Structures are given as structure tokens and as C-alpha cells.
Image: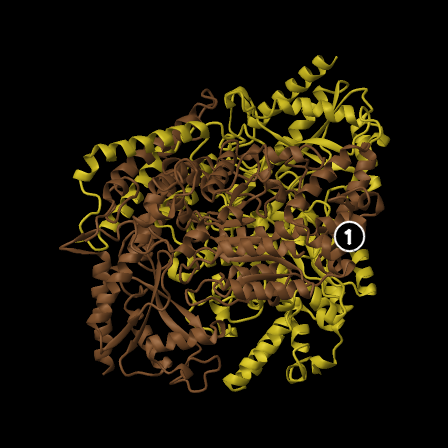
Chain colours: A brown, B yellow
Amino acid sequence: MQQHDNAFLAPLFLGLNGENGPLLERLLVDFLRDHVYWRRNFHPTDPPAVTVPDRITPEFSEAVARLEQELNVLSANLKKSIPVFSPRYVGHMCSDLLLPGLLAQLVTTLYNPNNVHKDAAPVTQQLELEAGTQLARMLGMATDTGTHPCAWGHLTSGGTVANYEALYHLRAARSFALALAGAGRPVARSLDVDGTPLEELPPWALYNLPLAKVLDLHDAWQTLLAGHSPGEAAALHAAVRDASLEQLGTAAFQQRHGLATPVVFAPITAHYSWAKSMQLLGLGERQLRLVPTDAHMRMDAAALAELAAAAAREQQPVLATVGVLGSTEFGTIDPIRALVELRDELQQQGLCMPVHVDAAWGGYLASMFRERDGSACPHDAMRETFRYFPSQAVYDAFTHLASADSVTVDPHKLGYVPYGSGALVVRDRRIIRFVRQRPAYLDDTTARPTASDDADPPLGECILEGSKPGAAAAAVWITHRMLPLDREHFGRLLRNTVQAGEYLYDRLQQTAEALAGRCRVVVPVEPDTNLLCIALNPAGNRSLAATNAFTRRVLSHLRLDAGQPIQTREFIGTHTSILRSRTPDAAAQRLCEALDVDAESFTDTPLDEDRDADHIFLLRHTLMNPWLFHGWDDANYMDRYCDHLQRLIIDALDTRA
Amino acid sequence: MQQHDNAFLAPLFLGLNGENGPLLERLLVDFLRDHVYWRRNFHPTDPPAVTVPDRITPEFSEAVARLEQELNVLSANLKKSIPVFSPRYVGHMCSDLLLPGLLAQLVTTLYNPNNVHKDAAPVTQQLELEAGTQLARMLGMATDTGTHPCAWGHLTSGGTVANYEALYHLRAARSFALALAGAGRPVARSLDVDGTPLEELPPWALYNLPLAKVLDLHDAWQTLLAGHSPGEAAALHAAVRDASLEQLGTAAFQQRHGLATPVVFAPITAHYSWAKSMQLLGLGERQLRLVPTDAHMRMDAAALAELAAAAAREQQPVLATVGVLGSTEFGTIDPIRALVELRDELQQQGLCMPVHVDAAWGGYLASMFRERDGSACPHDAMRETFRYFPSQAVYDAFTHLASADSVTVDPHKLGYVPYGSGALVVRDRRIIRFVRQRPAYLDDTTARPTASDDADPPLGECILEGSKPGAAAAAVWITHRMLPLDREHFGRLLRNTVQAGEYLYDRLQQTAEALAGRCRVVVPVEPDTNLLCIALNPAGNRSLAATNAFTRRVLSHLRLDAGQPIQTREFIGTHTSILRSRTPDAAAQRLCEALDVDAESFTDTPLDEDRDADHIFLLRHTLMNPWLFHGWDDANYMDRYCDHLQRLIIDALDTRA
């Protein structure tokens, strides 16, 4: 049995049996009291509003009794929660929380700072920005405010909002040169790109300027404004604002410049928030062009190249390409290196195609690839720690994250902090200048933002959300303090999860062998990280509908049942499906062969519901719990899961027979 | 001195001196231990991953020491936070938290449920939906799932996201009839409105169907689908989906139907999230048509009627009108009654103009207008409790909330729960059917939603956010349990805040009289609720620039200074500005007269910076702290604030002289 990194992990979590409960209690009580006495010493001579006699009245006692009773009911009901702390839970992307972040979240909630503005969060807004910088460094991005590009990051309520925000910033930046050109000759002839005045550039060229040149143009625009009197500058500023996409709306802006609605490329594995993004931003889900994946469920870069080349030919604007770093359903890693190289090639051909990486799941895994000094960890050194990980493709993807234009990372996933905590990181912080809002009740100036804000961008002005909890920022920040985002610290924690994925992958072969001739147990997608899916098919069955029904029967014993105590479940898992409509023909054929089902029963239009299905139903496992290698009697939790699964399969086969 | 409702308030908050610290500690520790022992008893015989010997190793001790040190630093830094618990803080919209919600939030965070899906939040997702229903009832909406309309509500990370979501749903619903009509004859001639097939109705009519008729059409559409074979139904469904605005994008959809980009009406006092909404949704900020306000800073309903009539004449689509219930800067209440009456009138003229109420601030005040049995509290009965509140206009606004199409309410404002907690309530829950997403890893079906989902709509499929904290839902839910949203419970808490506003308003007259001849102290906008702004002008000064500079000097003593301990501030306030660009001429004239400044110095284009200003700088006070009436030596906190302000003004006058 593989050695578990127990000495390292032991102080970091509350523990599967709540082993560190006394530690959590001691620290929580200490900092709770600290908060209470801070209140008492703000103006110590202000007499208490709740006196000691107040606290012994019947009315007071009754209110406290009701409070305690309501909390009793809540606490009792919460015992129906999924036991994410336990390595017996191998379902969705949740697990035990890191103690430092949990404590920081609880303690900071007492102070309830609002990170939308410094005035309301004198401490935690800074922590949020520092956490953003730490994430940027983990990705390998430069964070020196003296040079370009200088990365910037901040926290959102979750990855979905970070994804919206990424497109929001990109759309604004991409349309800026057109706004300048459309603001009238005084602007359009005063600014230039490589010596050519904007007024001489066609809309397609302006839309497709390299992102860095757009950001340089904003600098030049600020310089131009500074050279005018306040009155003139205000007039010029208003002219550009009035010509912007943000003012005109997408329809009028596109019509004015004769441009089609831009498309966004994303792999078929993209999270459903991308469909929502396209709807929300008014771009339309039809403009989300889903790129096929290869057999590893990674975006097919060659297919993307063809689609992008066609877009360039047809002058179809491309707002962005989304690469997924850790797909929600398979944990697979898109070829980020190929994406950024393609982006750079296309730019040579006059097509701007920024790359956003949706690393909501896989972002923190980058810590395994980062040395303490910030350099990239050599591939060979990494390979020593794992059996398979990271493949060359995966290594190349992680080591090219720094070249992405923006990245979504979710601290509330592999950052092991409480919900809701997402993050957006941009490679060049100038990109957030285009959508600022400056309400009079927050900022005492009606002036426009200037380049000098870049060193300390006013958070609340350029984010999608408003009031937001500083407690989440404290949780992420202290987590990064306790476990810096390199391979020796945070990476050491995540190493266990990838090792667990490899262990389970290997161990499942034994299960498959033990069931040989009775039931196929297939891992349909080779895992890139710490997610693993299993497909089942009873021997002799050739119909996908029957396969799916069988797998659903097995899963029913791996799901919590609201009518029964959670203790009745040995293990808890979840599921996903591979949809025929999103699977290339060759891959569908291959999957059916591996499962030994009739390829014709895997069809987009099921005709015979006893035989056909438009999806392959899979058991899905997220291996992020820190205690998966923990074991007794020579069996760790993954061994026990495989044994349990084997029993469930045999039971299902028996009851089927 | 007015009697403070102390016996009621005493058990509800931690207290300005942390008086209920022992209570909070006792309950928190109890439920923390409950959680720990729950873990231990999930599978009691699973051996601990962290053993007792593990916990006495040097590595363990060192990690704990580092954790404690980091938390020490965090806790120390948090003492720079704004002291929102204290009635000496009269700045932004924050205050002490209600103990029940705080405790529920802390305790539930230990379980870390994810409300995006029932599987990940078997308990708290239901609490979120119940909290939504409770809010709907507070607003007076019907919540019986057996009839139409039946309201629905849920929580967001904040009011800004709730506002986005409101427009997102409205846009989808408003375009649905056009999608049906555009999906081909088999659909367009099979469905009708009042007997006229959709194919015979022009786009303008289809866009302007009453919202209820659109929702009925969706029912009819479901019925029509149910009458076809699965294959036919899938084809019809795809045709309608492909013709929808969500698929096509706004530009293509509008072009197809020959419609202009819709506008949204909102008062000039609307929160800046509305400008962001218009940008984010691709509608364009230019389409946010700001309606002037009257002298009370309430939307001018007559001006809105004119704008809407012009829109009807010009066939300019109107997506919605936003009424503000408690403006961010003045706490003023828009004429919701006039808005919904105008909406109904316009519908008669063929213009659909749904009303969304942004009650992020004022929403919970509706609890004061609600009797325990759900009926509206008579105006006369309410007037007995207050000196001025509620005016007829304010009473009419609150008692017509039930007629709004959707409402934003922020529990993290006047609900006194931690950030981030907003809410969206819709009057007819069918409106959330149009934008559903059903990812394979969450839902084991690829079927489309049906009307039968209405009784229990799948939360995660129809909201903008993804993973989200169930802890916030538990906090809101338990708050509503402890203090039901009627005048005897939650309303009793909020009554104090409005009374505080009235008290301060009256008390400021004394300050103004005391300073008569030396400095004008003016309340430029008569308060509708519990927000109050003050304008100052030293006697003899006629220049607005000098007025503003003076007020800024006074405010500098009411702001926390990062370089000094928070204890150096007697009181802490904040500011806002009235912008000339958003003020009608008559109102600008009136304000200048009240302040005794030269009206010409209040100008949109300041020429002489020593004299002119484009804004009037104000001190802004939010009166939501529960202890404002608490006092000693015959002076409560508001008396003390007025005395302090008076001293600051005199000091500023003296140093100026």
C-alpha cells in the first residue's frame, strides 16, 4: 500500500472523524473572544446596550431558548448533508475544508467586511488582491506593476461569474479601437497603430488588433486626453464613450461597423456556464462553437485550427477561445500550449483570438508545476512522483498557462475553502480599464480612471458583482499563506489527489479482471488528473439502453437516499453522461467497442427505447479527499471502494439474472 | 428621550460591547462539537486518519503554531475594520448582524453545502427556496403553487446579480412568442393568442403580449409538445430553441424581427448595477433611459408616462421599468403604485412594460406593512408608531409591491445577515422556465423542463450563478424563522431604524438652529425611510466649490484613517454627491437656494474650479444600527452625533477663518 503523506496532512484538516475538533474549537473560541473584546474596547466607556439585568429577564431567556431550539433543528437537519469530509465520498467536487481557510472564513464573518470597496473592507480587499496575485504567480504570470504585461486577479462568488467577467472584459477591450475610430476624426486621426492612423484602418483590422496593442492604444488615449484642457478632454472622452459597445449595445455597435456577432470557441466538454455566458451577454448560444475532442476528451487543436482558419477567411469575429483545464466531467486537460501557439499564429494572419482558460477545477493543480522560486518544475522531476502524471500533453498545457489571456480558478474547488469562492486572473491588468463604474456614494470623484490606477486598480469599479464577503478573501489568502502555491506546499497536498487517481485507475484493473466474463468495467476516458469515470456493461449485453439501466441500478446504491440515514451508504458516488450529440463518430465507435455494445444503439435519435440511448451513463469519481490513502487491514479507501463496487455489480448481475 | 425597544432587541445581536459574547460562544461551541461528533459517527469504526500520536509530533505542533500565528496576524489586522457593530458608525449600509443568522452561517459553513444542486445540498437548497417564498409573502405575493400567478424567489450572492437575473429572465420571456412565431408554420399556426394564431400577429404585437399571456403560451406550447411523438416533439422543440433570442443572440434576433434594441427605464437614483446590467447583457447603457426624479428624489411618474407613451408611438420596445424601493444614496421610495398602474394602462395601448422593483435596500421594510396573517397593515395603524412615516406616497408604494413583476431584495442589507446574500423574487414562477440549463453531471436526464416542474423548480438550472454557499441560505432562513417577516417581528426591528431616521431629522433642526448665521445645515432630500443626507454651507459663501470643500473637510474627521487607531474617531460617516447632470433645472435651483449658494456655480461644465462644481457633496447617513436610541446622561447616540457634528463644523469654520 502506497505511503500516505500523513504527517503533512494531519494538521491541515478537521479530519474524517473530526480528529482536530479540539484544535478548531480552541482557535475559534480564542478569535471569537478577541472579536468580542475588540468591540468592548472601541469606546470602552460607552455603556452596554444589553445590560446584565437585561440578560436575566424572562423575555431574554425565552428568545434565547427559541434561538437554541431553531439551531437544534437546523443542526439536526444538516446531518442529512453529504459527508464530504469522508473518503467514502467520491462524488462531486467537494471534500473536507482546509482548517486555515475555514477558520479565517468563520472569524472574518464576525467582522463582516464588504470587499466591494476599501472603505467597507480596509483589510480584506487587500487580501483579495494579494490572493489574486498569488494565483497569477502560480500560473506563471508576471506580477511586477512596473512592466507590461502585469497580471491581476481577484475573487468572485464562483467560477461561473468569473467566466462571465472574462468575456465581459474581453468584449469591452476588443471593441475599444473601433470606439476610438468611431468617435470622430479628432480622435481617429490622432491615434495610430504602428504609424497608421485609426481612421485609415478598416473595422475588421481594428477588431483584430493584438490585445496588447489595444491596451497600448488605451495608454495613448490617456496621454492624448492629458494633453487637452479639462473641457476638451471631457468632450473627447464623451465622444469615445458614446461610440463604445458598452454604450451602444451589441446590435447597434455591430451594425455600425459591419461586423457579425463574434463567436467563442470551446470544447464540447466546456462547463454549462459557457452556454449561460453566451445567453447572458446577448451573444447567443449559437455563437458558442463547440470544438470536438480527441479520445482523451481534450479539445482537438487541429479541429480548432480549421474552425479558426475558416473564421479568418470569412471575417467572422472570434471573441475568444476557451480552453478547459480540468473538465467538469472527466478532469481532462485541453492543449493550452497548442491554443496559445495557434492564437499567436492567427494573429500573424490578422485574426485576434484571445485564449481564456477555464481552470475552475484544475487551476490549483498548477501549484504542482511551480518551484518555490517561481520557476517551472522540470518534467522529469515531476514524473518521479507519479506513475503516469503528467503526460507530455498535460505538462505542456500547465507550463503554458502563463500565456493565456485570462484564467478562471475556483478556490472553492481544489483550493479547499468554503463556497463561494471563484477567481479571475488576467495576464495584463490593463484589460480591466474598459468597463469601470464610479458611483458617487462610493468614490468622491467623477474623474475617469487613469493609467496610474493600474498599480492599485479600484476593485469595485471593474467587477461584475457588488457587495461581496471579505470573509472569502481572508479564507483564500490565509490558505495561500499556510500553503504557498508551489510544489512543496500546496502542490504537495494536490499530489495526493493525483496519486489517488492513479491508484484507483490501476486498482480498477483488478476489479475488471475479477469480473471478467461477467461484466465489463471500463475507464472510457484516460484520466489526466484526479477525476475518473467508469462505464459498466454486463457480459453478453449489446444494447446501450440496457447498459445504462444497469449502471443506474449500481449507482442507486451509491447515492444518498433522503429517506434513510447517511450511514446506510458504504460509499457515495455520482454520475455523468457522454452525449452522442457531442461525440465524434470515431470516438462513439471506440467507446462502444470498449464496452462491447452495439454501436448502432448509441444514437442521437433513439428509436427503440429498450435498445437505444443518446448517452452513455457513467459513474463519476472526484478524488480530492485528503484521506483516500488512509487504510487499515491492508486496504485503503480506494481498495475498499473497488471491493464495494465489485459487490454492487455482482448483486446487480444476480438480481438481473 | 424616546423609549428604545431594548427588551426585544437585547437577545438578537452580539451587542455594541459584545455583551452577548458568552451566548454566541456557548451556542457556537455546542454546534461545532455536534458537527465533530457527527463526523465521528458516520462510520464509527473507521479508524482516525489523524491519530493521537500524530498530534504530538513536532511537525504537527509546528504546523499548528504557524496556523495560530497566521490567524493572530489576520485577527489583529481585522481590527482595522470599520466598527459596523457600533451606533457610532452611521456610514454605509452595514451594521451588527442578527445572532441567529450569524450562528446559522457559521455552523452551516462547517457542512459546506453547495446550493446549486439538491445532491450537494440536501437540506439548504430547500431552505433557500423557503426563504424565497417568505420574501414573496412579505411583499404580498401569492405563493400557492396551485394557481397563477404563484411567486418564486431564491437567493443570489448579492443584489447586483439579482438585478442581472431579473433582466435575463424578462428578456427571455419577452422574446418567447417571437421565437414560437419564428419556428415555422407548424408551431406558429398551432398556437394562438385569444384566438389569433401567432403567425398572424406582427412582431411588435408578439413582443408586447402581456407577460401573463406569454407564460400561458408556454403552457400551451408544452401541451402541444405532449401531443406529439417523442421524435416530432424533439424536432419542434429544436425549431423553437433555434429561433430563440438565447440561441441567436440579440443582434440577429432583433434583425430577424425588425425590432430595435429594447430600452429599460430607471430613475436617475438607480444603483450603478443597472448600468452594468445593460452593458453585460449587451443592451448598451444608452438604452438605460434615466427618468428624472421629483424633489423627493422619487421617480417622476409623469415623466415616465411621457417617455413610455413616446416609446409606444415609436414602436420602441421597452424591456422593463425599474422602480427603486430605497435608493442607495437617499433611501427614497419610487412611486411603485403609479408604475404598476401605468404598466397596466400601457398594456391596454399595446405596450408591454414589466415593472421590476430594485428593493435591495428597502425590501425588508415591507415587513412593517404586513400583519401576522399576511394582510396589509392599515395606514392609520402604522402612522401611530411614527412621526412622519409612512407618507401616503410611501404607503402606496409598499402596498403595491405585490403587483410588481419581479423584485430584488438584499438579506445582507436590512436582513442583517452576513455578505453575500441577495434575492430575486418573481411574481409568476413560470418566468424562470425560459433559460434552463441541464448539465449531464448534475441531472440524469436530457429531457426538457415541463410545466410540472413549477411546483419544485430545479434551482440550479435557471439561475445565473453556479456553485453557491448553502450557509447563506441557512442564515436567511433561520432569520425569518426567528423573526417572521411581519410588523410584530422583523418589522419591529426595522421600525427602530425608521424612528431613528425621524429622530435624527428632527434633532438636526436643533443643530441647524444652533449654527444659524454661521453655517447652513440642510437636509436636501426629505427622507422616506432610514437614510439621511446633510448638506453644509458656511454663512456668506455663495460658491458651490467652496461649499463642497468645506463639507469634505468636515467629513475628513468622520472617516477612518488607516494610519490611526479606529478609536480616534468619535463617529464614522460617509458621503455622496448630487450630480448636476442628473438633476432637473428646477431641482438644482431649489437645492442652491436651500444652501444659499449661487445657482450658476452648480454646473455641468465647471469653468472656474474655485467657484463651480458639477456636484453637491453631501454627508450620508444610514441609520440601521439597532442601538442608535441607546443613551446615557440624557443623550442617545444621535444626540451625540449631532453635538459632534456641530463641533466639527465650528472647528472647520474656525480654521477656515
Q: Is residue A571 above or below residue B521?
A: below
Relative to residue B537, is residue B213 drawn left or right?
left
Residue B16 vs residue A597, the one in the foreground? A597
> Which quadrant holds residue A279?
bottom right
> In x, y percent, where is residue B97?
47, 39
* Number of numbered labels in the structure image: 1
Q: Is residue A132 above or below residue B555?
A: below
Say few, some or many: other residues with alpha carbon within 10 Å of mark 1 (under 14 / 14 to 19 / 20 or more).
some
Residue lying farthest left? A633
Residue under mark 1: which chain is it in? A
The residue type indicated by label 1 comes to Leu
> In x, y percent, where is residue B558?
60, 25
Q: Which residue is mark 1?
A: A201
Q: Is residue B407 visible?
A: no
> Which quadrant holds residue A545?
bottom left
Task: Identify the image quadrant of the C terminus of chain B.
Answer: top right
Name the residue at 74% across, 40% down. A221
Name the residue at 58% across, 83% down. B224
Residue B549 vs residue A326, the one in the foreground? A326
> In x, y percent, where is residue A136?
49, 42
Task: Identify the image quadrant of the N terminus of chain B.
Answer: top right
Q: Is residue B72 above or below residue A615?
A: above
Residue A121 vs residue A93, the one in the foreground? A93
Residue lying farthest right? B600
Q: Is residue A367 visible?
A: yes
> In x, y percent, where is residue B9?
46, 37
Residue B295 vs residue A126, the one in the foreground? A126
Q: Secondary structure at mark 1?
A: loop
Q: Is residue B165 above or below residue B630?
A: below
